[in-house]
Image (cartoon, grey):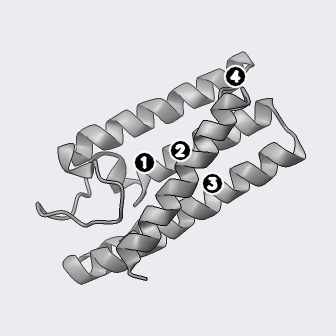
Amino acid sequence: MTLKWISLAATGVLVVVVVGLFLRHELFATGPAAIAVQAVAVVLMVWARLSFGLRSFHAGANPTAGGLVTKGPYGLVRHPIYAAILLFLWTGFSSHASVLTACVTLVASIALAVRMFTEERLMVERYPEYREYAARTKRVIPFVL
């Protein structure tokens, strides 16, 4: 199985999880502070999309032409879109904490980790300078992880 297919499978898992949480009414936060955190996650996602441009819309890991993006939120973390999704999902979990919701959110987190690692391997192949960028930029939490 190629890295692109692995990333597509991870995307499929993520979509199923998000739809499942939505249908169970456990995707969106309920308290004001949690809603504010999810709003920050949405802003981060939009900022990352605008920084990366239209070429970021693809289902599988697929490094696109146009050079390595290191501006905007990509200067803080390598995967701001995935960071935003994780923040959104775990904040939703905080409002609807249950064993099932924790397990499903953990599955989504694993799917996102698979996406990150497959994309990084492909990025190194396409952009040799990615190694240096990765060495100085954390994956999803600035200065931490």
Residue found 40% across the figure and 53% down from its top: 76
Q: Distance between the residues labelled 4 and 2?
A: 17 Å
Residue found 28% across the figure and 47% down from its top: 57
Q: Do the residues labelled 3 and 2 touch (CB within 8 Å)?
A: yes
The residue singled out by tag 2 in the image is 85
Residue found 19% across the figure and 63% down from its top: 64
User: Looking at the picture, which amino acid does disc 4 mark?
Assistant: Ala
The residue singled out by tag 4 in the image is 33
Q: Quadrant of residue 125?
A: bottom left
Task: Tell me which label, 3 or 2, sits earlier in the chain.
Answer: 2
Residue 81's label in the rendered image is 1
For numbered disc 1, what is the local secondary structure?
A: helix
Q: Do the residues labelled 1 and 4 touch (CB within 8 Å)?
A: no
For numbered disc 4, what is the local secondary structure?
A: helix
Rendered position, 46 above or below 5 = above
Query: Is the N terminus in the top left, top right, bottom left or bottom right quadrant?
Result: bottom left
Q: Do the residues labelled 1 and 2 touch (CB within 8 Å)?
A: yes
The residue singled out by tag 3 in the image is 108
Task: Tell me which label, 4 or 3, sits earlier in the chain.
Answer: 4
